[in-house]
Image: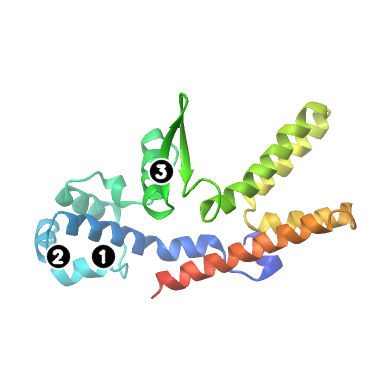
Amino acid sequence: MAIFMNMFGGEDFADINEDRSGARIGERIKKIREAREMTRAELGELVGLDQNRVQQYENGKRKPKIPLLKKFAAALGVETIALMDPTTESYVGAMYALFQMEEKLDMKIVKKDDCYCLQFGDGKFGGMNNYLSKWYEVRQALDEAMPNLTDEERKKKVFDYNMFEWTYPGGIAMNAYRKYDEHPINRMQEIREDSEYFKSMMEEVERSSQEDNR
């Protein structure tokens, strides 16, 4: 069970992700089918299902196993990975993850000088930028501290940074309590901001989950 669940009683993000997995696959199947102006009956004929069963897969009531998913992909004329939740263990997988972010998170690719960059919305406020700002803050603190640390201190600092990733988002609130233990007076504003950030993020996740279940 995730650490932040024990502390705050929230639902594990792994459960949320798994619960929505079939629905996400179904949404992609439906989107591509409609883009190809294909009926459920026509798609079903190509994969060996009736239109009611196709609808169940599109609605997320059923989650296709890989052999059936390959049939859907072949019938729709797309790569199987285009229907799946992408992973980032390869360049191709990472590209499909970026395609998903373009669609879902208002991301676009921009070129600045000779560098390709990813920008969310206006690149400054709202949406994904709220999440990135906290990550940037933690990463910058690590990079600035490293040159002045001993090898043992660097090891601990890197571990703390990794724990921020591995316990995200609960690690934000955990870090706030740790700061209080270390500096109970002069870190109160920062602690308050971290706690408010975590609270707002959890409210956003809850709203998103409710919208998905409608």
Residue pointed to by mark 3: 108
Residue 107: x percent and y percent? Answer: 43, 47
Disc 1 crowd rating (10 Å Cα; few below 14, some 14-19, many 20+) is: many
The CA span between labels 2 and 1 is: 9 Å
Image disc number at residue 138: none
Disc 3 crowd rating (10 Å Cα; few below 14, some 14-19, many 20+) is: some
Disc 2 crowd rating (10 Å Cα; few below 14, some 14-19, many 20+) is: many
Q: Which of these two is toward me, 180 or 68?
A: 180
- SS assignment at label 2: helix
Check the image and name the residue furthest to the bottom. 214
- SS assignment at label 3: strand
Q: Which residue type carries mark 1? A: Glu
Residue pointed to by mark 1: 58
- SS assignment at label 1: helix
Residue pointed to by mark 2: 40
Q: At 31% across and 70% down in the image, what residue appears?
A: 61
Q: Are marks 2 and 1 in contact (CB under 8 Å)?
A: yes
Count all numbered tags in the image, as a single digit: 3
Query: Which-is-in-front pick, marks 2 and 3?
Result: 3
Q: Which residue type carries mark 3? A: Lys
Q: Which residue type carries mark 2? A: Arg
Considering only order in the chain, which callout, 3 or 2, is on the residue closer to the N terminus?
A: 2
Residue 194: x percent and y percent? Answer: 71, 57
Q: At 74% across and 57% down in the image, what residue appears?
A: 174
In the displayed structure, does residue 41 sit left or right of residue 142?
A: left
Q: Are marks 2 and 3 in contact (CB under 8 Å)?
A: no
Q: At 51% across and 56% down in the image, what residue appears?
A: 127
Considering only order in the chain, which callout, 1 or 2, is on the residue closer to the N terminus?
A: 2
Displayed quadrant of residue 191: bottom right
